[in-house]
Image (cartoon, helix red, strand yellow):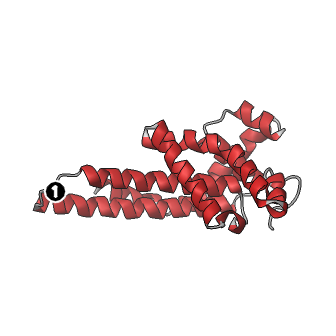
Amino acid sequence: MENESPSDPDWLIRRTLQQDPIKGFELLYQRYYRPLCSHVARLVYSREIGEDLVGDLFYHLWQNNQYSQISGSFRAYLFSAARNRAINYLRWEFNRTQPTEESDLTDRIDSAESDRDLAFEELTVRINRALEALPPQCRNVFIMSRFEGQKNTEISSQLAISVKTVEGHLTKALARLRQSLHDYWLILLLFLVW
């Protein structure tokens, strides 16, 4: 497996998954369940729904043996998958509460929303690609900061690096993301305004 060294934050989990999948999956669950629930709850504005969505994510990871196919960062994969589930839930919830009356205005609104959804999905794919292109430590710091909402001092102590190093990783990640998404912002802005 890629990233298989003690410097990989998930090294122990990967090794345990290879030797004893049940114990390895328990470690994966224990490490990421709570941070994922917090992240998803902020997106769907409900702790209970967040816990359901994350529980469902782990269930599918186990049932379909998907955990063994993750060659990159578990953290990046899980946060991306959890975010996608939250977005899908919000879309479902929005469609469920929409009025059923059909009109020309409704059709135009639906079309604009569909365009925005496509633009948002494209942006999500581009962000995920840009994150995967970052060096592992830089990616982990960015995800812990921006997706998990951890403070620089918390990241510093958890990863055993200085706060200045955390700040350096964040600066590097943001610069690379800006560079990767530079050509896309105008297109996204046009879709959101239209």
Residue 178 image offset from top left, x and y in percent: 58, 54
Height in image: 156 above or below 30?
above
Under tag 1, what secondary structure? Answer: loop
- Quadrant position of the C terminus in the picture: bottom left
The answer to whether one can see residue 178 in this image is: no
User: Is 93 positioned to the left or the right of 72 in the image?
Assistant: left
Q: Tell me the residue at 61%/64% (across/down).
A: 63
Q: Residues within 10 Å of mark 1 (few under 14, many from 20)?
A: few
- Quadrant position of the N terminus in the picture: bottom right
Is 38 in front, or is 112?
38
Q: To which residue does mark 1 refer?
A: 100
Is 124 in front, or is 63?
63
Height in image: 132 above or below 159?
below
User: Is 160 positioned to the left or the right of 146 in the image?
Assistant: right
Is 191 in front, or is 175?
191
User: Is 155 positioned to the left or the right of 89 in the image?
Assistant: right
Amino acid found under the numbered disc labelled 1: Thr
The answer to whether one can see residue 118 in this image is: yes
Height in image: 24 above or below 69?
above
Residue 138 image offset from top left, x and y in percent: 73, 50
Q: Tell me the residue at 11%/62% (across/down).
A: 104
Total number of numbered labels? 1
Q: Tell me the residue at 56%/58% (across/down).
A: 127
Residue 106 image offset from top left, x and y in percent: 16, 58
Q: Tell me the residue at 75%/40% (across/down).
A: 166
